[in-house]
Amino acid sequence: MKMIIKAVALSVLLSANAAMAGDFKVGVVDTERVLRESVPAVNAEKRITKEFSGRDLEIKALVKQAKDLQALLEKEGVTLSDVDQRNKERELTTMNADIQRLQREFREDLNLRKNEELAIVLERANKTIQVIAESEKFDLILQEAVYRNPKIDITDKVIQHLADDKPASK
């Protein structure tokens, strides 16, 4: 008897779900793709590259200088006096420590800036998703999914809308 009641209850639930599913509109957005391909994300990446290119060049020049000093020590180390060799080795050690510190600071600053810019792009993308959801009467839009059917993927719409949209005033 309990088995029959459970079966009836299950069939009622399934038929109610099927009836509701016809009126339920779902969309899925690939956030990573939006953060990689949208116009605001590409522009942010260009700004960051431009902003950090000077520091990157300085570090590369310092690395080249250290390599040149290392080559000099290897090539002429035998002909240098002990004092000169120790001074050059000390200079190289100090230079390598400076390079490592500068590279670490560069990476930290770069990651911080990227996170700031991505947060701005993500905020714009979320507003865009909300506009699309309201205008196209979506009931639910998911931003992450293990699997997404291309029929409900609205990532291209979001990217296009972001390309057409003017940036918010700063």
Image (cartoon, rainbow, N blue to C red):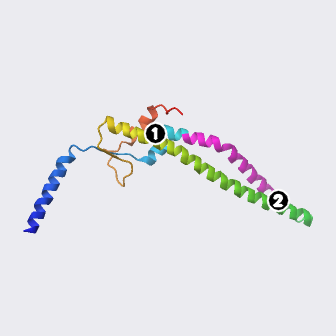
Q: Does the magenta segment cover residue 71?
A: no
Report the mark closest to the observer, 2 or 1. Answer: 1
Residue at (72, 56) in percent of width and height: 99
Q: Secondary structure at mark 1?
A: helix
Q: Does the magenta segment cover residue 49?
A: yes
What is the magenta segment's predominant secondary structure?
helix
In which quadrant is the N terminus drawn? Answer: bottom left
Q: Position of residue 51 (x, y in %)?
A: 64, 41
Q: Position of residue 44 (x, y in %)?
A: 55, 40
Give the side of residue 31 with respect to residue 151, left or right.
Answer: right
In which quadrant is the C terminus drawn? Answer: top right
Q: Secondary structure at mark 2?
A: helix
Residue at (58, 40) in percent of width and height: 46
Give the side of residue 90 with respect to residue 26, left or right.
Answer: right
What type is the residue that disc 1 sits on? Arg
Q: Position of residue 144 (x, y in %)?
A: 39, 51
Q: Position of residue 62 (x, y in %)?
A: 75, 52
What type is the residue that disc 2 sits on? Glu
Mark 2–mark 1 distance (CA, rounded to whole Å): 49 Å
Task: Name the residue tied to disc 2.
Answer: 91
Give the side of residue 17 with respect to residue 141, left or right.
Answer: left
Segment colored magenta? 44-70
- Confirm whether residue 70 shows in the render: no
- Confirm whether residue 65 shows in the render: yes
Task: Name the residue tied to disc 1.
Answer: 124
Residue at (61, 43) in percent of width and height: 49
